[in-house]
Amino acid sequence: MKRPLLFALAVIPSLLAAQTVLYSDDFESYTVATMIAQNNPTNWNTWSNAPGGTEDAPISDAQAQSGSKSIGIVANAAGGGPTDLLLKLGNKTTGSYVLTFAAYIPTGKGGYFNLQHQENVAPAQFAIEVILPASGDVQVNSTGTVETIGTYPHDTWFPVILAFDLDNTAAMLAVGSNTPYAWASNTSTNTATLVNQIGAIDFFAYGGGTDMGEMYVDDVSYIAVTPSGIATAQRDAVSISPNPTRDRATVTLSSPLTAQAVIELVDMTGAVVDARATVNGNSVLLDLGKVQAGVYFVRVADGAQQFTGRLVKQ
Protein backbone atom coordinates (compact mmCIF):
# COMPACT_ATOMS: atom_id res chain seq x y z
CA MET A 1 0.00 0.00 0.00
CA LYS A 2 1.34 3.40 -0.91
CA ARG A 3 2.09 5.40 2.21
CA PRO A 4 1.40 9.12 2.60
CA LEU A 5 4.13 11.64 1.93
CA LEU A 6 4.99 11.90 5.63
CA PHE A 7 8.21 9.94 5.35
CA ALA A 8 9.20 11.53 2.05
CA LEU A 9 9.05 14.94 3.71
CA ALA A 10 10.64 13.83 6.94
CA VAL A 11 13.50 11.54 5.98
CA ILE A 12 15.83 14.23 4.68
CA PRO A 13 16.72 15.70 8.11
CA SER A 14 18.49 12.44 8.85
CA LEU A 15 21.09 13.36 6.24
CA LEU A 16 22.09 16.19 8.54
CA ALA A 17 22.60 13.83 11.47
CA ALA A 18 25.42 11.34 12.04
CA GLN A 19 26.12 9.18 9.03
CA THR A 20 28.36 6.33 7.96
CA VAL A 21 29.34 5.85 4.33
CA LEU A 22 28.82 2.19 3.49
CA TYR A 23 29.81 2.50 -0.16
CA SER A 24 30.67 5.34 -2.53
CA ASP A 25 31.97 5.07 -6.09
CA ASP A 26 32.45 7.32 -9.12
CA PHE A 27 34.00 4.43 -11.14
CA GLU A 28 37.08 6.47 -12.04
CA SER A 29 39.47 3.89 -10.55
CA TYR A 30 38.45 1.11 -12.95
CA THR A 31 39.60 0.34 -16.47
CA VAL A 32 37.12 0.98 -19.29
CA ALA A 33 35.42 -2.19 -20.61
CA THR A 34 36.20 -4.21 -17.48
CA MET A 35 33.24 -5.46 -15.43
CA ILE A 36 32.15 -3.77 -12.21
CA ALA A 37 31.09 -6.91 -10.28
CA GLN A 38 34.26 -8.68 -11.30
CA ASN A 39 36.28 -5.64 -10.21
CA ASN A 40 34.37 -5.19 -6.95
CA PRO A 41 32.58 -8.36 -5.80
CA THR A 42 32.30 -6.95 -2.27
CA ASN A 43 29.63 -4.45 -3.34
CA TRP A 44 28.36 -5.87 -6.64
CA ASN A 45 27.08 -9.17 -7.97
CA THR A 46 24.92 -10.38 -10.85
CA TRP A 47 21.48 -11.98 -10.79
CA SER A 48 22.92 -15.45 -11.45
CA ASN A 49 25.91 -14.88 -9.14
CA ALA A 50 28.34 -14.78 -12.06
CA PRO A 51 30.57 -11.67 -11.93
CA GLY A 52 32.51 -11.20 -15.15
CA GLY A 53 29.84 -12.91 -17.24
CA THR A 54 27.25 -11.50 -19.61
CA GLU A 55 25.07 -10.20 -16.76
CA ASP A 56 27.88 -8.02 -15.44
CA ALA A 57 28.04 -4.34 -16.45
CA PRO A 58 31.07 -2.75 -18.11
CA ILE A 59 32.84 0.40 -17.05
CA SER A 60 31.96 2.89 -19.79
CA ASP A 61 33.38 6.18 -21.02
CA ALA A 62 30.35 6.85 -23.23
CA GLN A 63 28.77 9.04 -20.53
CA ALA A 64 29.79 10.37 -17.13
CA GLN A 65 28.37 12.82 -14.63
CA SER A 66 31.72 13.28 -12.90
CA GLY A 67 35.11 12.40 -14.30
CA SER A 68 34.98 10.34 -17.48
CA LYS A 69 33.48 6.97 -16.48
CA SER A 70 30.21 5.36 -15.43
CA ILE A 71 28.68 1.89 -15.68
CA GLY A 72 26.57 1.01 -18.71
CA ILE A 73 23.32 -0.94 -18.36
CA VAL A 74 22.69 -1.66 -22.05
CA ALA A 75 20.22 -4.15 -23.52
CA ASN A 76 20.68 -6.16 -26.70
CA ALA A 77 16.95 -6.89 -27.07
CA ALA A 78 13.71 -5.11 -26.24
CA GLY A 79 12.81 -7.94 -23.88
CA GLY A 80 15.78 -7.00 -21.72
CA GLY A 81 19.24 -8.26 -20.81
CA PRO A 82 21.79 -9.52 -20.77
CA THR A 83 23.01 -7.06 -18.11
CA ASP A 84 21.42 -7.91 -14.73
CA LEU A 85 23.55 -6.26 -12.09
CA LEU A 86 23.05 -6.24 -8.31
CA LEU A 87 24.26 -3.55 -5.92
CA LYS A 88 24.39 -5.20 -2.50
CA LEU A 89 22.65 -3.35 0.33
CA GLY A 90 23.52 -5.74 3.14
CA ASN A 91 20.17 -7.37 4.00
CA LYS A 92 19.34 -4.56 6.43
CA THR A 93 16.32 -5.05 8.70
CA THR A 94 16.75 -2.13 11.10
CA GLY A 95 18.07 1.42 10.87
CA SER A 96 17.89 4.19 8.29
CA TYR A 97 19.71 4.32 4.96
CA VAL A 98 19.97 6.60 1.94
CA LEU A 99 21.08 5.41 -1.49
CA THR A 100 21.72 7.94 -4.26
CA PHE A 101 22.98 7.65 -7.81
CA ALA A 102 22.89 9.61 -11.03
CA ALA A 103 21.26 8.17 -14.18
CA TYR A 104 21.53 9.04 -17.88
CA ILE A 105 19.24 7.70 -20.61
CA PRO A 106 19.68 8.72 -24.28
CA THR A 107 16.71 9.82 -26.38
CA GLY A 108 14.77 6.85 -27.73
CA LYS A 109 16.01 4.53 -24.97
CA GLY A 110 14.65 3.48 -21.60
CA GLY A 111 15.90 2.28 -18.25
CA TYR A 112 14.90 0.15 -15.29
CA PHE A 113 15.87 -0.90 -11.78
CA ASN A 114 14.21 -2.68 -8.90
CA LEU A 115 14.74 -3.19 -5.19
CA GLN A 116 15.07 -6.74 -3.92
CA HIS A 117 14.33 -7.62 -0.31
CA GLN A 118 17.29 -10.03 -0.20
CA GLU A 119 20.81 -10.06 -1.64
CA ASN A 120 20.24 -13.69 -2.59
CA VAL A 121 17.61 -13.26 -5.31
CA ALA A 122 16.66 -16.94 -5.43
CA PRO A 123 13.76 -16.67 -4.96
CA ALA A 124 13.28 -13.06 -6.04
CA GLN A 125 11.30 -10.75 -3.77
CA PHE A 126 10.58 -7.47 -5.53
CA ALA A 127 10.00 -4.57 -3.12
CA ILE A 128 9.52 -1.98 -5.88
CA GLU A 129 10.14 -1.73 -9.62
CA VAL A 130 11.02 1.53 -11.37
CA ILE A 131 10.43 1.58 -15.13
CA LEU A 132 11.74 4.43 -17.25
CA PRO A 133 10.42 3.90 -20.81
CA ALA A 134 11.52 5.99 -23.79
CA SER A 135 8.37 8.10 -23.42
CA GLY A 136 10.05 9.85 -20.49
CA ASP A 137 7.53 8.63 -17.91
CA VAL A 138 8.59 7.45 -14.46
CA GLN A 139 6.56 4.35 -13.63
CA VAL A 140 6.63 2.49 -10.31
CA ASN A 141 5.20 -0.79 -9.07
CA SER A 142 5.20 -1.39 -5.31
CA THR A 143 1.85 -3.15 -5.02
CA GLY A 144 1.49 -5.22 -8.18
CA THR A 145 0.00 -2.29 -10.11
CA VAL A 146 2.11 0.06 -12.25
CA GLU A 147 1.48 3.78 -11.81
CA THR A 148 3.10 6.85 -13.35
CA ILE A 149 4.57 9.32 -10.83
CA GLY A 150 6.24 11.86 -13.12
CA THR A 151 8.73 12.24 -15.95
CA TYR A 152 12.49 12.15 -16.40
CA PRO A 153 14.74 13.96 -18.91
CA HIS A 154 16.69 12.33 -21.73
CA ASP A 155 20.27 13.18 -22.69
CA THR A 156 21.12 14.64 -19.29
CA TRP A 157 22.01 13.28 -15.88
CA PHE A 158 19.26 13.20 -13.27
CA PRO A 159 19.38 12.16 -9.61
CA VAL A 160 17.75 9.12 -8.05
CA ILE A 161 17.29 8.90 -4.27
CA LEU A 162 16.06 5.93 -2.27
CA ALA A 163 15.66 6.41 1.49
CA PHE A 164 14.67 3.77 4.02
CA ASP A 165 13.51 4.02 7.62
CA LEU A 166 13.21 0.34 8.43
CA ASP A 167 12.36 0.91 12.08
CA ASN A 168 9.19 2.67 10.92
CA THR A 169 8.57 0.41 7.88
CA ALA A 170 8.89 3.36 5.51
CA ALA A 171 10.63 3.99 2.20
CA MET A 172 10.88 6.87 -0.26
CA LEU A 173 11.89 7.20 -3.93
CA ALA A 174 12.73 10.48 -5.67
CA VAL A 175 13.55 10.56 -9.40
CA GLY A 176 14.71 13.83 -10.93
CA SER A 177 12.62 16.79 -9.81
CA ASN A 178 9.40 14.79 -9.26
CA THR A 179 7.49 14.73 -6.00
CA PRO A 180 8.88 11.87 -3.88
CA TYR A 181 6.97 8.59 -3.90
CA ALA A 182 6.54 6.90 -0.52
CA TRP A 183 5.63 3.31 0.22
CA ALA A 184 5.87 0.76 3.03
CA SER A 185 9.28 -0.93 3.12
CA ASN A 186 7.74 -4.35 3.78
CA THR A 187 5.65 -4.48 0.60
CA SER A 188 6.32 -6.89 -2.22
CA THR A 189 5.07 -6.91 -5.79
CA ASN A 190 5.24 -10.65 -6.39
CA THR A 191 4.66 -12.55 -3.15
CA ALA A 192 2.22 -12.59 -0.25
CA THR A 193 5.14 -12.75 2.19
CA LEU A 194 6.04 -9.25 3.35
CA VAL A 195 9.69 -8.72 4.33
CA ASN A 196 10.88 -5.51 5.98
CA GLN A 197 14.40 -5.79 4.59
CA ILE A 198 16.54 -4.19 1.90
CA GLY A 199 18.83 -6.59 0.07
CA ALA A 200 19.95 -5.28 -3.31
CA ILE A 201 19.25 -2.88 -6.16
CA ASP A 202 18.92 -4.73 -9.46
CA PHE A 203 19.96 -2.78 -12.56
CA PHE A 204 18.43 -4.75 -15.42
CA ALA A 205 19.02 -3.73 -19.05
CA TYR A 206 15.38 -3.09 -19.92
CA GLY A 207 13.31 -0.23 -21.30
CA GLY A 208 9.76 -1.30 -20.52
CA GLY A 209 9.29 -4.18 -22.96
CA THR A 210 9.01 -2.19 -26.19
CA ASP A 211 11.93 0.22 -25.94
CA MET A 212 15.59 -0.77 -25.84
CA GLY A 213 17.21 -0.29 -22.47
CA GLU A 214 20.28 1.94 -22.27
CA MET A 215 20.99 3.57 -18.92
CA TYR A 216 24.26 4.78 -17.44
CA VAL A 217 24.82 5.00 -13.68
CA ASP A 218 27.38 7.20 -11.93
CA ASP A 219 28.27 8.62 -8.51
CA VAL A 220 26.74 5.94 -6.31
CA SER A 221 26.49 6.69 -2.59
CA TYR A 222 25.05 4.41 0.10
CA ILE A 223 25.03 5.69 3.67
CA ALA A 224 23.64 4.68 7.04
CA VAL A 225 22.18 7.57 8.97
CA THR A 226 21.30 8.15 12.60
CA PRO A 227 17.71 9.42 12.61
CA SER A 228 16.95 12.82 14.01
CA GLY A 229 13.19 13.00 14.15
CA ILE A 230 13.09 10.87 11.01
CA ALA A 231 9.45 9.93 11.46
CA THR A 232 8.33 13.47 12.22
CA ALA A 233 6.79 15.40 9.34
CA GLN A 234 8.31 18.75 8.39
CA ARG A 235 5.33 20.76 7.19
CA ASP A 236 6.33 24.31 8.08
CA ALA A 237 7.18 25.33 4.51
CA VAL A 238 4.64 26.26 1.90
CA SER A 239 6.94 25.99 -1.09
CA ILE A 240 10.39 26.08 -2.65
CA SER A 241 10.28 27.77 -6.01
CA PRO A 242 11.38 27.61 -8.69
CA ASN A 243 12.49 24.04 -8.28
CA PRO A 244 14.53 23.01 -10.25
CA THR A 245 16.34 26.34 -10.55
CA ARG A 246 19.45 27.77 -12.14
CA ASP A 247 20.12 30.93 -10.14
CA ARG A 248 17.86 31.56 -7.18
CA ALA A 249 15.16 29.90 -5.14
CA THR A 250 12.70 31.18 -2.55
CA VAL A 251 11.66 29.12 0.46
CA THR A 252 8.29 30.29 1.76
CA LEU A 253 7.42 29.29 5.33
CA SER A 254 4.20 29.46 7.28
CA SER A 255 5.53 31.92 9.90
CA PRO A 256 8.04 34.81 9.91
CA LEU A 257 11.61 33.92 10.86
CA THR A 258 13.47 35.40 13.79
CA ALA A 259 17.03 36.72 13.87
CA GLN A 260 18.11 33.40 15.41
CA ALA A 261 17.04 31.32 12.42
CA VAL A 262 19.65 28.89 11.05
CA ILE A 263 19.56 28.38 7.28
CA GLU A 264 21.76 25.80 5.57
CA LEU A 265 22.17 24.34 2.08
CA VAL A 266 23.40 20.75 2.33
CA ASP A 267 24.73 18.52 -0.46
CA MET A 268 24.19 14.78 -0.84
CA THR A 269 27.21 13.96 1.34
CA GLY A 270 25.82 15.97 4.24
CA ALA A 271 28.29 18.84 3.79
CA VAL A 272 27.07 22.41 4.18
CA VAL A 273 27.47 24.39 0.95
CA ASP A 274 28.26 28.10 0.88
CA ALA A 275 25.18 29.92 -0.43
CA ARG A 276 23.93 33.40 0.40
CA ALA A 277 20.56 33.45 2.17
CA THR A 278 18.43 36.58 2.65
CA VAL A 279 15.49 36.51 5.06
CA ASN A 280 12.41 38.63 4.41
CA GLY A 281 9.60 37.89 6.82
CA ASN A 282 8.46 34.33 6.21
CA SER A 283 10.56 33.80 3.08
CA VAL A 284 14.20 32.96 2.44
CA LEU A 285 15.89 33.93 -0.84
CA LEU A 286 18.80 31.65 -1.76
CA ASP A 287 21.46 32.90 -4.17
CA LEU A 288 22.71 29.78 -5.99
CA GLY A 289 24.77 31.49 -8.67
CA LYS A 290 28.05 30.01 -7.40
CA VAL A 291 26.64 26.62 -6.40
CA GLN A 292 27.39 23.65 -8.64
CA ALA A 293 24.55 21.79 -10.32
CA GLY A 294 23.17 18.92 -8.28
CA VAL A 295 20.67 17.85 -5.65
CA TYR A 296 20.65 19.72 -2.32
CA PHE A 297 18.58 20.02 0.81
CA VAL A 298 17.55 23.32 2.34
CA ARG A 299 17.36 23.26 6.12
CA VAL A 300 15.67 26.02 8.12
CA ALA A 301 15.70 25.80 11.92
CA ASP A 302 14.03 28.53 13.96
CA GLY A 303 12.83 27.34 17.34
CA ALA A 304 9.75 25.19 16.90
CA GLN A 305 9.66 25.98 13.18
CA GLN A 306 11.71 23.36 11.39
CA PHE A 307 11.86 22.59 7.67
CA THR A 308 14.02 20.52 5.35
CA GLY A 309 13.24 20.39 1.63
CA ARG A 310 14.84 19.05 -1.52
CA LEU A 311 16.19 21.49 -4.13
CA VAL A 312 17.60 20.75 -7.59
CA LYS A 313 20.19 23.20 -9.00
CA GLN A 314 20.50 22.88 -12.77
Image (spheres, rainbow, N blue to C red):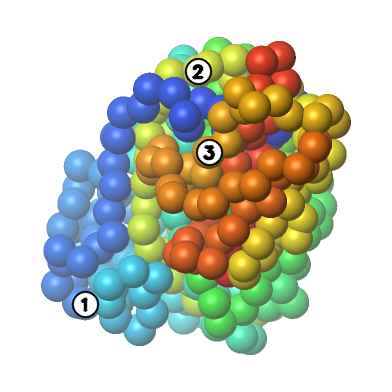
Q: Amino acid at mark 1?
A: Ala
Rendered image quadrant of residue 91? top left
In the foreground, 24 or 118: 24
Q: For residue 239, say whether it is visible.
A: yes
- Of labels 3 and 1, earlier in sequence is 1
List x then y, in percent, for residue 270.
41, 38
Would residue 314 be found to the left or right of residue 65 on screen? right
- Disc 3 and disc 1 in contact, CB within 8 angstroms: no
Residue 227's mark?
2
Element class at badge 3 = strand
- Distance from the alpha carbon under mark 2 to that under mark 3: 18 Å
Would residue 256 be found to the left or right of residue 82 on screen? right
Camera-nearest label, 1 or 2? 2
List x then y, in percent, for residue 75.
47, 76
Q: For residue 268, say whether it is visible.
A: no
Q: Residue at x 80, y 30 (%)?
A: 256
Would residue 259 be found to the left or right of residue 29 on screen? right
In the foreground, 247 or 133: 247
Question: Would you name the residue on which mark 1 appears?
Answer: 33
Residue 2's mark?
none
- Distance from the alpha carbon under mark 3 to that under mark 1: 41 Å
Q: Residue at x 76, y 43 (%)?
A: 280
- Of labels 2 and 3, earlier in sequence is 2
Question: Would you name the residue on which mark 3 appears?
Answer: 264
Q: Amino acid at mark 3?
A: Glu
Rendered image quadrant of residue 184? top right
In the foreground, 206 or 64: 64
Q: Amino acid at mark 2?
A: Pro
